[in-house]
Image (tube, helix red, strand yellow):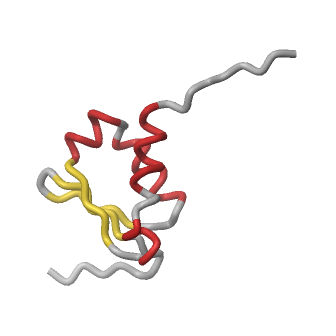
Amino acid sequence: MALIYRPVPKSNKWIKQIFSAAAVAKGAVVRRDCAWVEKVASMKDLETEVRNRRFHMILTGDQCVIICNTGHLQVVC
């Protein structure tokens, strides 16, 4: 039986790349332009991955800010 090669969708590769950043391993913040997210992946796919990792995502202006920490989130102001 021959193996069938199915390429990983572009959005999955891009999202995987975001979460392989050094900042993610340190529990820091990753920021991306929302329009760029929609161009190379989708907000839905990004949100799903953020939720799966139990991180937090904030949309502010034209930016997606991902807090790579599973701790409690408190918005001060």
Residue at x 72% of width, y 19% of height = 4
Q: Position of residue 15 (x, y in %)?
A: 43, 47
Classify 25 as above or below 66: below
Q: Position of residue 72 (x, y in %)?
A: 41, 81
Position of the C terminus by quadrant: bottom left
- 53 displayed left or right of 65: right
* Residue occupying the far right of the picture: 1
- 48 displayed left or right of 59: right
Looking at the image, which is closer to me, 29 or 22? Answer: 22
* Residue occupying the far top of the picture: 1
Q: Position of residue 68 (x, y in %)?
A: 40, 70
Q: Position of residue 7 (x, y in %)?
A: 56, 27
Quadrant in the rendering for residue 63: bottom left
Residue at x 41% of width, y 76% of height = 27
Counting labels gives: 0
Residue at x 30% of width, y 81% of height = 74
Quadrant in the rendering for residue 30: bottom left
Quadrant in the rendering for residue 41: top left
Classify 20 as above or below 41: below
Residue at x 87% of width, y 16% of height = 1
